[in-house]
Amino acid sequence: MTFRPSGTSMVPLIRSRQQVVVAPVDPSKVETGDIVLVRVAGTVYLHLVSSVDPARKRVQISNNRGRVNGWTSHARVFGICTAVDGVARSGVAGKMLAAHSDDASRT
C-alpha cells in the first residue's frame, strides 16, 4: 500500500505528504524503532514502535516527538513502513508477511 500521510508528528523520519510504502507485517517480528501502521484506541496511526512486550503480544507506539500513544495488541498491527519517498527503510527485511516478501522479490 502506498499513501501520503499528513501531519508533523513523525518529522524528520516522515514529513507531511511524503509518499510512504507500507507492507503487511508479522507483528511478532516488530522491533523498537520500526514504523508501523497500527490501531490504538480506535485511531489508526503510522508511528514508531517505542517498546515491545512479546510475552503479552503487544507493542507500544509513539510519535517522533516523544508522545506515547499507547499499547496495542499484535492483532492491530497492520503493516510496516518499507520506504519513504522511494528510499528503503533499513531493518524491515524478514518482518513482512511471506506473501508480500515473495511478491517483492519478483519485482
Image (cartoon, grey):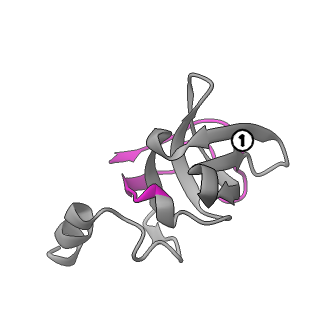
Q: Using the image as rendered, state which of residue 33 and residue 13 is in the foreground.
A: 33
80 vs 48, left or right, is left
Screen quadrant of the C terminus? bottom left
Q: Which residue is mark 1?
A: 8
Q: Quadrant of residue 32?
A: bottom right
Percent of width and height locating residue 83 = 46, 64
Of all residues, the one furthest to the left in this rendering is: 106
User: Is residue 14 something one can see in this rendering?
Assistant: no
**Main secondary-structure element of the magenta-colored stretch:** loop
Q: Using the image as rendered, state which of residue 77 and residue 8 is in the foreground.
A: 77
Q: Name the element at disc 1.
A: loop
Percent of width and height locating residue 18 = 53, 50
Q: Is residue 17 magenta?
A: yes
Percent of width and height locating residue 66 = 85, 48
Of all residues, the one furthest to the front in this rendering is: 55
Q: Which residues are magenta?
A: 1-27
User: Is residue 18 something one can see in this rendering?
Assistant: yes
